[in-house]
């Protein structure tokens, strides 16, 4: 009897309020932070059907906040870049499943999923640096000029900040390099963006990779993305630089011997012909 009455009441309620939703909503899954150069998105799944998502975020120890762009969403990501102002603080976020805009529900509390803690300074991925190569006139030194990666953060004067502006002395660069035709690799760390390399063979081509390196981070998060490979040009070398004097002397000697043999053969052939002609003339006289 109670079941039948509940069914009648539910049907009557649905008739009066067509937007009223009974039951619960699916919880968000795979809630993660996706951050590159301090451009920070909160992402999750699945895409909602007949319900929406709202994101609430907070600095650790403070109350949750909402931003207009992430309320009653049909999407599965929320851009929180401009909201995470204190880059060294811990942040968390709740992805709340709730009715679509204008809808209602008989739920007292909507289901939600909480993200892992996120610290922008420690957790954002640093992207690939760009750099230029300059070879000295004497071919004994190569200098790398690294461009500090720009970020999604803006300063007080609305200028875009670089990773150098944010990390300051905490930023170094890791340089990996090798001869162009070799697999052996060397590494060097530098606190500056201009790196001189002098332990190189004169005139040889070398290939380089560069990564940002953050000193204060945990080992698994210290290195940024690996740059594209760039190689220095190889200087054209003379025969005296390419081969030793011994090899060159032996080659010259071999050429002289070959020429001498050829000349000797020609002379012998000429003498034989002269001798044969003399014998023919003698036999004709007889």
Image (cartoon, grey):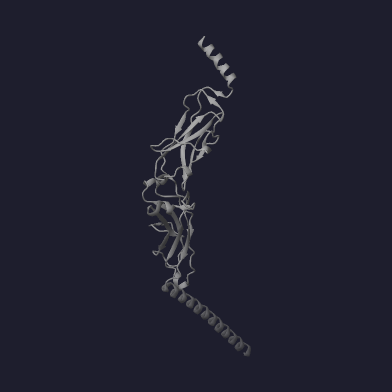
Asked whether 19 or 164 is in front, the reply is 19
Q: Residue at x 52, y 78 (%)?
A: 262
Q: Is residue 177 above or below residue 18?
A: below
Up-down relation of residue 135 to residue 107 (above or below): below
Q: Is residue 118 above or below residue 185?
A: above
Residue lying furthest right: 284
Q: Position of residue 150 (x, y in %)?
A: 48, 52
| Residue lying furthest top | 1
Q: How many labels sit on residues?
A: 0
Residue at 56 percent across and 27 percent down: it is 103
The x, y position of residue 133, in whole percent, is: 47, 62
Relative depth, front residue between 83 and 209: 83
Q: Position of residue 139 (x, y in %)?
A: 44, 68
236 or 227: which is nearer to us? Answer: 227
Q: Quadrant of the C terminus?
A: bottom right
Q: Position of residue 1 (x, y in %)?
A: 52, 9
Please name the residue shown 41% across and 61% down the image.
Answer: 195
Q: Indicate the quadrant where residue 86 lies.
A: top left
Of residues 219 and 27, which is closer to you in this image? 27
Residue at the bottom extreme of this rendering: 285
């Amino acid at each position: 009897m109670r079941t039948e009455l509940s069914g009648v009441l539910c049907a009557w309620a649905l008739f009066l309020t067509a937007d009223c939703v009974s039951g619960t909503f699916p919880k968000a899954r795979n809630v993660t932070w996706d951050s590159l150069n301090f451009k920070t998105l909160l992402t999750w799944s699945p895409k909602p059907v007949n319900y929406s998502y709202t994101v609430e975020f907070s600095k650790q120890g403070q109350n949750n906040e909402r931003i207009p762009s992430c309320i009653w969403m049909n999407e599965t990501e929320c851009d929180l870049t401009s909201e995470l102002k204190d880059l060294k603080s811990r942040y968390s976020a709740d992805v709340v499943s709730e009715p679509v805009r204008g809808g209602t529900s008989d739920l007292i509390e909507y289901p939600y999923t909480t993200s892992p803690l996120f610290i922008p300074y420690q957790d954002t991925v640093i992207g690939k640096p760009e750099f230029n190569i300059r070879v000295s006139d004497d071919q004994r030194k190569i200098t790398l000029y690294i461009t500090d990666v720009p970020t999604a953060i803006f300063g007080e004067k609305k200028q875009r900040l670089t990773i150098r502006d944010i990390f300051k002395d905490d930023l170094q660069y890791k340089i990996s390099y090798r001869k162009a035709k070799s697999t052996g690799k060397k590494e060097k760390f530098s606190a500056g963006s201009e790196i001189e390399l002098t332990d190189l063979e004169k005139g040889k081509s070398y290939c380089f990779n560069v990564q940002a390196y953050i000193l204060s981070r945990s080992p698994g998060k210290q290195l940024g993305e690996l740059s594209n490979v760039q190689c220095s040009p190889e200087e054209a070398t003379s025969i005296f630089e390419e081969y030793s004097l011994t090899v060159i002397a032996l080659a010259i000697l071999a050429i002289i011997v070959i020429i001498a043999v050829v000349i000797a053969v020609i002379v012998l052939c000429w003498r034989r012909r002269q001798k044969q002609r003399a014998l023919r003339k003698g036999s004709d006289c007889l």
